[in-house]
Image: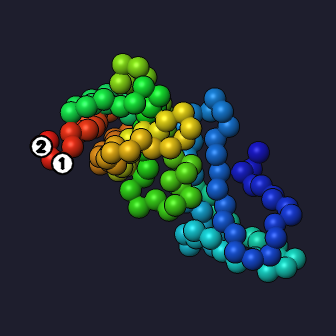
């Protein structure tokens, strides 16, 4: 009730804290971890040490990033699937894996809810049923600024035209 928590069983050595929202609870995102008022990506834990002064700072996002994927200059394989992932600019590698994402539907549309205000990169990821990226599909990213409490619409254009065909 007072916002404190205890985590036990942490091994000695370098460690970091990450947090995921429970399924169904949209909007909360861990923005940073502080120790004694200083932002820390990771820190050392000595054997038997009691770590104190750690603060987890969350945002609550009320925005939506929605959009459409337009494919030109070709077609994806029939077993291809698309996902859009948004990553806060300057995010660490572990934040990339915890980022919000949505599948692109058959009409090319997607919607990501509970997004916090900030500057992001939207990445289009294309993969097949076996998890591989189809050959000759370029990487696609787009910068997007998302204000608080809005629905931001974007279009991602995936150009499959071969270099020699342009």
Find numbered disc 2 in the image and state the secondary structure of the residue it sits on.
loop
What's the mark number on residue 163? 1
Foreground of the two, 83 or 37: 83
Considering every residue shown, the one lying at the far bottom of the view is: 46
Q: Regarding mark 1 in the picture, which secondary structure is present there? A: helix
With 159 as the anchor, is 31 left or right in this view?
right
Residue 60 lies, in percent from the top left, at 52, 41
Please give left or right for residue 45 compared with residue 32 in the image. right
Label 2 packing within 10 angstroms: few (<14), some (14-19), many (20+):
few
Image x and y of residue 166, in percent: 12, 43
Q: Total number of numbered labels?
A: 2
Nearer-the-camera pick, 68 or 153: 68
Where, by quadrant of the figure, is residue 112 drawn?
A: top left
Q: CA distance from mark 2 to mark 1?
A: 6 Å
Residue 148 seen in the figure: yes
Task: Point out the residue furthest to the left here.
Answer: 166
Image spot of residue 88 (x, y percent): 42, 52
Q: Quadrant of the N terminus?
A: top right
Residue at image position (41%, 20%) is: 106
Residue in view at x 56 percent, y 58 percent: 94
What numbered label is drawn on residue 166?
2
Question: Could you tell me if the residues under marks 2 and 1 are in contact, i.e. CB atoms within 8 Å?
Answer: yes
Q: Residue furthest top?
A: 107
Q: Quadrant of residue 108?
A: top left
Q: Is residue 67 above or below residue 40?
A: above
Instruction: Give the residue at x 58% y 70%.
Output: 40
What colouring style does the render use?
rainbow
The dot on residue 44 is none
Judge whether residue 122 can be spotted in this image. Answer: no
């Amino acid at each position: 009730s007072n916002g404190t928590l205890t985590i036990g069983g942490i091994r000695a050595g370098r460690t970091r804290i990450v947090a995921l929202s429970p399924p169904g609870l949209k909007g909360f995102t861990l923005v940073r971890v502080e120790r004694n008022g200083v932002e820390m990506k990771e820190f050392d834990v000595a054997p038997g040490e009691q770590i104190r002064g750690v603060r987890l700072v969350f945002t609550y996002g009320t925005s939506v990033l929605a959009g459409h994927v337009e494919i030109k200059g070709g077609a994806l394989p029939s077993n291809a699937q698309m996902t859009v992932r948004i990553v806060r600019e300057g995010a660490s590698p572990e934040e990339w894996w915890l980022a919000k994402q949505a599948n692109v539907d058959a009409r090319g549309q997607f919607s990501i809810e509970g997004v916090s205000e900030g500057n992001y990169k939207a990445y289009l990821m294309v993969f097949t049923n076996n998890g591989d990226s189809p050959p000759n599909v370029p990487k696609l990213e787009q910068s997007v600024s998302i204000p608080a409490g809005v629905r931001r619409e974007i279009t991602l254009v995936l150009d499959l035209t071969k270099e020699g065909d342009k």
